Amino acid sequence: MNTGHKIFFIGVVILSVAAGSRFNDPSGANGNPPASIIVSTSDQKPIPENSSPVATVEPAAQNDSTTGSNIQVSGQPEILSPAQDNSKSALNNDALLKSDSASGIGAFRQTGSDAPPEIQAQSALVADLKTGEVYFRLNPTLRWPTASLTKLMTAMIALKNIDLAKPVKIGEENAGAMEEATHSMDFPQSDSGQAGQATSAAFFKPGDVYSGNDVLAAMLIISKNEAAEAFADAYGRADFMMALNAEARDIGMSSTNFSDPSGLSVANQSTALDLQKLVLNIYRNYPKIFDITRKKSATITELNSKKKITLSNINTFAGTTGFTGGKTGYTGDANGNILSVFSYGGRPVLVIVLGTDDSFGETSAILEWFEKNFQKS
């Protein structure tokens, strides 16, 4: 074999080896690289804070510090991050994704530099309701007893599952049995004059029958505990409580628990961020709740006797200009809670204040500060 033949033979061998390695190496098979699995941090499910509901109120220091350094005010609106939400939250629910002229931009811009008011509340929040942008927050993940704010979820479940045009009978176990507790709800004893005036009428006796709509009005306007219990009994109390908690999960209230329909139990707990989701769901899907809560008064009728009863709203904001709707709450464990939606710049602005001696005063102070320092974009 001459030199030329040797060179040709060596070349053929080299090409054969290279081709063989190409088809036997999975990294180059069919000319495509091997499949790789990429795990994105955005796909990892976050573990929600305090994901397991508890029946006791933990000290604020174990949840969020209540010092002023944790009050966050920003001219750059803050959108809830995925870690604070979940796939079924109200903010991501297809039924709620309606067009909003402010979507993708800040609904409000900061035009002033005043410091926010000093408040005694354990938790507070100010946000544009439709976009979810938060402009003021104090301990927003602090779990706190909801007191009568619970009745907002009870109203949702009643509207969703009960024909309110039909009569609802007041049972023996509900009528009058909670009257003393009713007086302790929504206002501290020092403010009981207003609450007493609204709830002093001894109605809801055993065997009384009201339309479901009138029971709803009594529950929302004067925070009648018996009304909440009547809805639970009409539906089946165990099933009603399951529905309350299932709805909370469905709209992303991962740090919320309901143990009764009225809010008497300290085990009824939520956070400002969870309540924001609840209010958005009400605003979008159950506007009747806010239609009722913004009224100064309403008249209901006991169907057997045809007796008419006038209810005066215990919420000081009811009937005032700009107030869209909301709910008050008070127990000894929760202190004063209030959740309010106001119209400002043609947009719904949510103010939540939890755990304070002056829920109306602190809400007014926060709203005044916001309106002075933020303008519609």
Image (tube, grey):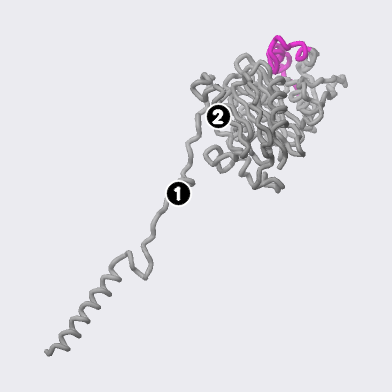
The residue where tag 2 is placed is 141
Apparent side of residue 211 relative to residue 25 in the rendered image (left or right) = right
Q: Residues within 10 Å of mark 1 (few under 14, many from 20)?
A: few
| Residue 40 image label | 1
Residue type (three-letter) at the residue carrying disc 2: Thr
Q: Position of residue 12 (x, y in %)?
A: 22, 81
Residues shaded magenta: 169-196
Q: Quadrant of residue 188?
A: top right
Q: Position of residue 85 (x, y in %)?
A: 56, 39
Q: At x 70% / y 47%, what residue is drawn?
A: 98
Is residue 257 something one can see in this rendering?
no
Q: Is residue 175 magenta?
A: yes
Work out how far the residue at label 1 is from the one at label 2, CA to CA, in angstroms.
25 Å
Q: Is residue 171 magenta?
A: yes
Q: At x 73% / y 23%, what residue is drawn?
A: 227
The N terminus - image quarter: bottom left
Residue type (three-letter) at the residue carrying disc 1: Ser
Apparent side of residue 288 relative to residue 173 in the rendered image (left or right) = right
Furthest toward the left, the residue is 1
Furthest toward the front, the residue is 113
The C terminus - image quarter: top right
Q: Could you tell me which secondary element the residue under label 1 belongs to? A: loop
Q: Earlier in the sequence, mark 1 or mark 2?
A: 1
Apparent side of residue 166 relative to residue 124 in the rendered image (left or right) = right
Q: Quadrant of residue 183?
A: top right
Q: Could you tell me which secondary element the residue under label 2 belongs to? A: loop
| Residue 216 image label | none
Q: Residues within 10 Å of mark 2 (few under 14, many from 20)?
A: many
Is 332 situated above or below 7?
above
Q: Position of residue 368 (x, y in %)?
A: 72, 27
